[in-house]
Structures are given as C-alpha cells and as structure tokens.
Image (tube, helix red, strand yellow):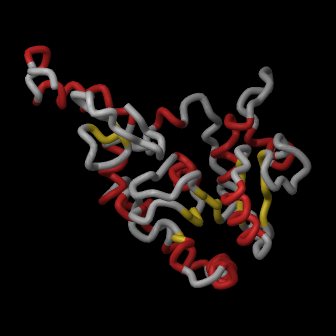
Amino acid sequence: MDLEAGRKRSGVEDIFIGYHAKDDVQSTYAGALFHNGRNYHLSSYKNNDTLVYWSSSRCLPERNRLTKSILSLLPHHSFGKCLNNVGGPDMALSLYPDCMKDFNTVPKWWDHLHCSMSHYKFVLAIENTVTESYVTEKLFYALDSGAVPIYFGAPNVWEFVPPHSIIDGTKFDSMQELASYVKALANDPVAYAEYHAWRRCGVLGNYGKTRAASLDTLPCRLCEAVSRKGGRNATPL
C-alpha cells in the first residue's frame, strides 16, 4: 500500500493499493477518516474582506513560490508556518473562537482546520507533487468546509470532484488573470453560488466514485480483491 506521489511497485506484490484507478485497489483521500476528531462546525458567514484561506507548515520551495505569486494579488489569511501573515500558527482560534473544539484541552492546529476554512469564500489548495490522480486531502478539506478551492495539482482533477466545484488555477494564462477572476467571482453572488450548486444534489458523479473508493471502504474492497484472486488458495506470484 502506497498513497504517496512517489508510488512504485516493487514487483513482488500480489495486490498493490494506491491512489490511482489503474492500481489493483484504489484508495482516495476523500473519506471521513481524514476528519476524525476535528471540529466540524461550519460558519454560515463568509469573510467578504479577506477572500482566501491558506495554511501550510511544510514549506516546500516550489509551492511557496507559487503560493506567494497568487496570494500577493489577493486579500488573504495565511496560517501555519509557511508565509504566515496572521501573527502565528495558532491565530485561527483568536479570529474564530467558535472553532474551539474543547475548552478543556490544548488545541492542535488540525482540530479547527475545517471550521477555520469555512469562514472564507476560497481556500488555496496546492499539492506537494503534481502528478496524475494524486488528489489529496488538501482539496477535499476545502470542499467539505463549504469553500471554493483554488486548486493546483493533478491534471485530471475533474475525475475526482463534483462538477463546477473548484477553480483550476492551471487553466489561467497568468496569476493576474486568476486573481482578477477570483475577485470578480467574490463580488458576483449568482456566479459564486453556481460553484455550490452541486451541494443541493449531494454526493454525485465522479465525486461519488471518489468517496466510494476512499480509505473508509478499503477493508471491504481489499477483501473483495483477494476473493477475486482466489483468497487463501490463490497461487502467489
């Protein structure tokens, strides 16, 4: 089993579990297991002055460069360790006390991740590695929080998400063009609402397949794969 971008078969596996649909058993990052134990309160109000949420504590040079080029053009709050502009990695709870999960425990930054995101119209989601089908929790966190993701990552991302639900940053000729689009969208209630139209229909289309292939369902799907190969009576490689 390997869900990281550097996925490689060793050549001796009877069954290989990976993030790609071509693997023996696929496992996506869209399931609830990535959300367990967190404050899932979602704000019903969006910040109209600060449009974009960004949070990262793994400061990769190429991702930092891309992040800086887009956020320099848009009003934003940057949490985490990378390009922080709010005064520290734990400032989300100062800005949004409704995101405190438990007043009797010391919060961790991931406890209030979804709740904090939900206060923004847009969430910048950039993968660590750009490769086909590598669509991680960074994108699904943003969708689940009720924001519109601005996404940079897998070229086939639309195979994993609801229709008209994200802004694919790679489809713009420049960061200036992307920023202009985001600002215009933020000021157009009808156009912005269209990015959330899919929510009225629930989980559907490609997104339904993505959720069905998540880690949540992996044990059962792995058993099915073993059964198809003959179970314990299968001939090993």
15 sits to left or right of 106: left
Comparing 63 with 220, the one in front is: 63
Comparing 163 with 134, the one in front is: 134
91 sits to left or right of 176: right
| Residue 124 appears in the figure | yes
Residue at (54% x, 30% y) in the render: 36
| Residue 45 appears in the figure | no
Residue at (33% x, 37% y) in the render: 9
Comparing 237 with 50, the one in front is: 237
118 sits to left or right of 4: right
Up the image or down, 236 lies above or below 150; here it is: above
Residue extending farthest to the top is: 232
Q: Position of residue 88 (x, y in %)?
A: 88, 45
User: In which quadrant of the rendered image does the C terminus lie?
Assistant: top left
Comparing 44 with 33, the one in front is: 33
Residue extending farthest to the front is: 11
Up the image or down, 127 lies above or below 187; here it is: above
User: In which quadrant of the rendered image does the N terminus lie?
Assistant: top left
Q: Position of residue 233 (x, y in %)?
A: 8, 15
Up the image or down, 37 lies above or below 233; here it is: below
Q: Position of residue 61 (x, y in %)?
A: 72, 56
- Residue 94 quadrant: top right
Residue at (70% x, 45% y) in the render: 58
Q: Position of residue 97 (x, y in %)?
A: 81, 42
Q: How many marks?
A: 0
Up the image or down, 142 lies above or below 29; here it is: below
Residue at (58% x, 84% y) in the render: 173
